Amino acid sequence: MFRKKKNQELDLTQKEPCAGERRKFLAGEAVFFSPKPMPAYHLKSEDTVPSSEILEVNDAYMDIGVRCQGKAFQVQFGLVSINAVSFVALLILTHAGFFYGGPFLDAFLRAFNEIVFGISIVYLLLAGIVWFVIIKTSFEYARQRPIRFHRQRREICYYPDGRTTPVIAPWEQIVSWVALSRGTTGTNVMTTYTFGMAIPTPDGKDYWLLRQPVYSVGEAQRKWETMRSYMDEPQKNWPRSLPFIKEDRAMFDAERERIWAKFKKGPRKWLSFKFTDPADSYFTLFCYYFYHILSCWKIPYLVSEWTDSLNKKPLPENINEWSQPLPKNEWQQPSEALLTQRTAIKKHYEAGGNLTNFLQTKH
């Protein structure tokens, strides 16, 4: 989900930021959402949107992370690329068989002997690159552990720098921001946006930094509100998790049976280019099967299942215990400073203000 960086651009250790602060750095500026955790905009219950980053959410905790999504397509794309080389080589050999003249089989074998070594080298090179990328990205996915937000304890659990030992940090001490960086290509000025979080180390002297590229300030605000609304808002304002379709062999079989049943039901055309609906014609159905044959049928889904299983490591026993719900009388409450500031910023939003001018107008 995030790319980890050292605390270089934003000097958080020398001067702790506060919500609403704008801080300039070498290539741009950042606007902070916390600490204390403040809403990024005037929140309404109808503003809550589903998030694909929510892995699990319940009354006690919420997990934010990445799903094993798109792995099957990655494998399909790689296998189609390398198997297309074999298919093109077969077409070349077939053409060469006619070109050489004489009995077709003899000419085909002569052409095969002449180019088989070069084709084999190219195929093995491509296959090695493709499978290296597939396996590398699978293990990178497995090393990414979710961040767990415990609402009742008002703490978060994270795994710094890919370590297996988690660290617990107070929610109200989390630093979050959206950064706008400007650069030039020589002819144009480009603006990039980054959503960032800084989680304090146990000794309180430094931060573990996480940064994720986003398309806009609005996307960064929605990411922040996904976390903050769960931790600080009533249940009606909690974020929702998007339904997750697991990319496995069962999904492939079910989709193939659906397409075949629809094709048999008809009406059937001979030719169409509606590739989003393989059952639309004989041609699109042929392309569907040909594509999956080139991508080795169920192998991409088998790899997806394997990749998904890599990430299902059991949590340490102390984190399982930490994740359990608490009796209501033991729930940690927001600090008075947070409640005071949150009341002030909600009034500020209702008056038409925004986060960036909150510090200038608050009393």
Image: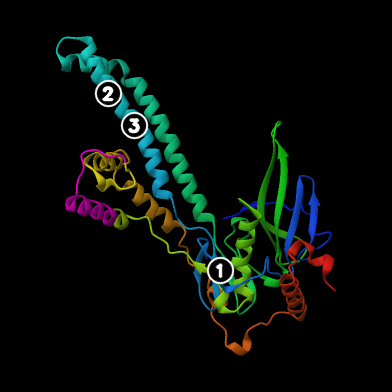
Residue 127 coordinates in the image, percent (x, y): 39, 34
Which residue is depicted at the point 30% across and 43% down?
A: 292
Mark 2 crowdedness (10 Å alpha carbons): few <14, some 14-19, many ≥20: few
Q: Residue 87 in the image: x percent, y percent? A: 30, 29
Pick whichever of labels 1 and 2 is earlier in the sequence: 1
Label 3, residues with CA under 10 Å away: few <14, some 14-19, many ≥20: some
Measure the alpha-carbon separation of dots 3 and 2: 11 Å
In the displayed structure, 113 sits above or below 85; it is: above
Q: Which residue is mark 3?
A: 84
* C-alpha separation, residue under disc 1 versus residue under disc 3: 45 Å
Q: Residue furthest top?
A: 101
Q: Is residue 222 above or below residue 270?
A: below
Q: What SS does tag 2 mark? A: helix
Let me know if residue 206 is in the magenta part: no
Q: What residue do we see at 68% from left, 65% from top?
A: 40
Q: Nearer the viewer, mark 1 or mark 2?
A: 1
Verify whether residue 272 appears in magenta. yes
Majority secondary structure of the magenta segment? helix
Residue on which the image places disc 1 = 48
Relative depth, front residue between 199 and 92 = 92
Q: Which residue carries the number 2 mark?
A: 91
Instruction: Pick the residue in front: 30 or 293.
Output: 30
